[in-house]
Image: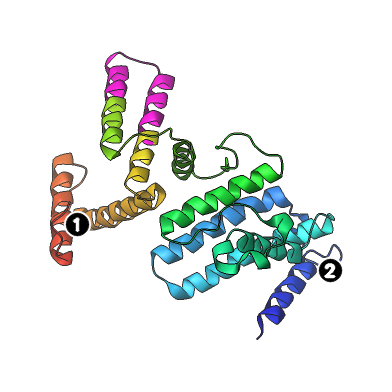
Amino acid sequence: MPMTRAIDRLLAIMARLRDKERGCPWDVQQNFATIAPYTIEEAYEVADAIERRDIPALKDELGDLLLQVVFHARMAEEAGYFAFDDVVAAIADKMVRRHPHVFGDAEIPPERAGGPAVRGSVAAQNEAWEAHKAAERGATGDAGSVLDGVALTLPALLRAAKISRRAARIGFDWPDAGAVIAKIAEEIAELEAELDGGGSQAAREEEIGDLLFAAANLARKLDIEPETALRRAMAKFERRFRHLEALARERGTGRDIDALEALWQEVKRKERIHHGDTKE
């Protein structure tokens, strides 16, 4: 089925679902705010399918995510704001505008041009991409902080990484990863001082926040995506803990912490042997 026919069918389905007389009552009563949580959830399910390398699931989850775009576009069209075709045209224009090194200036309308045309490394392309975005903000009169445009609804760890990258673009950054490690040690010492001194819960929360933000900065300096790293760490913990639970039930360990710790170490040893890995 040609892509235009496939997307037209989906657009028609959504229009029918939103029909006030013949549509689905649930779909009809939705609005941007009520649908937004589903949009976020579907994006995470796409990421989960990728993480699990489940290609059939990825196809399904991408479809679910596309439906979210169609849903928002349909509601916007009903309100007279814009339609699905406007969304597609806007992102197509943006991709061409931000890749002059690929498409050439001749393919970019003069009024939409801006930013450097750069070929080279991935790092150079990332810098060029950010320069194009900054030029676009300037063209619309938005010449505020370099932190502008970082969505408040992002997961906190992901937003921390993006905020710190933005700050680093104007030179507000540590010289290397070692300096960030020293900052993490400083934050741990400050947290310990709050605990030893009987500090308030608000003060402890602040110090934990500073520690997490410093950890996100360390990940950035090491070119590691902290959100991905944390997800993988949680997946590893969950896998090992489920194994520990199974052994504990089998051996009647109960809640004895020493016995549980011994099982935890056993699980890790078995996993390392299975994978030929010597790391913890």
Indicate which label's residue lies in the foreground, 2 or 1: 2
- Vertical relation: 49 (above or below) 222: below
Residue 86 appears in which quarter of the rendering?
bottom right
Q: Residues within 10 Å of mark 1 (few under 14, many from 20)?
A: some
Left or right of 123: which side holds 109? right
Q: Nearer the viewer, residue 269 or 92?
A: 92
Can the viewer see residue 152? Answer: yes
**Label drawn at residue 32:** none
Residue type beneath disc 2? Arg
Residue 269 appears in which quarter of the rendering?
bottom left
Do the residues under discs 2 and 1 have CB atoms within 8 angstroms?
no
Residue 83 rendering spot, x and y as whole percentages: 78, 62
Residue type beneath disc 1? Leu
Residue bearing mark 2: 22
- Of all residues, the one furthest to the right in this rendering is 21
- Vertical relation: 153 (above or below) 66: above
Asked if residue 51 lies in the magenta stretch, the reply is: no
Q: Separation of disc 2 and disc 1 at Cα?
A: 55 Å
Residue 15 rendering spot, x and y as whole percentages: 79, 68
Residue bearing mark 1: 247
Give the magenta part as a residue range: 189-212
Q: Nearer the viewer, residue 127 or 37?
A: 127
Residue 202 rendering spot, x and y as whole percentages: 44, 21
Can the viewer see residue 28? Answer: no
Tag 1 secondary structure: helix
Asked if residue 210 lies in the magenta stretch, the reply is: yes
**Residue found at x 84% / y 68%:** 22
- Vertical relation: 240 (above or below) 171: below
Q: Earlier in the sequence, mark 2 or mark 1?
A: 2
Residue 84 rendering spot, x and y as whole percentages: 74, 64
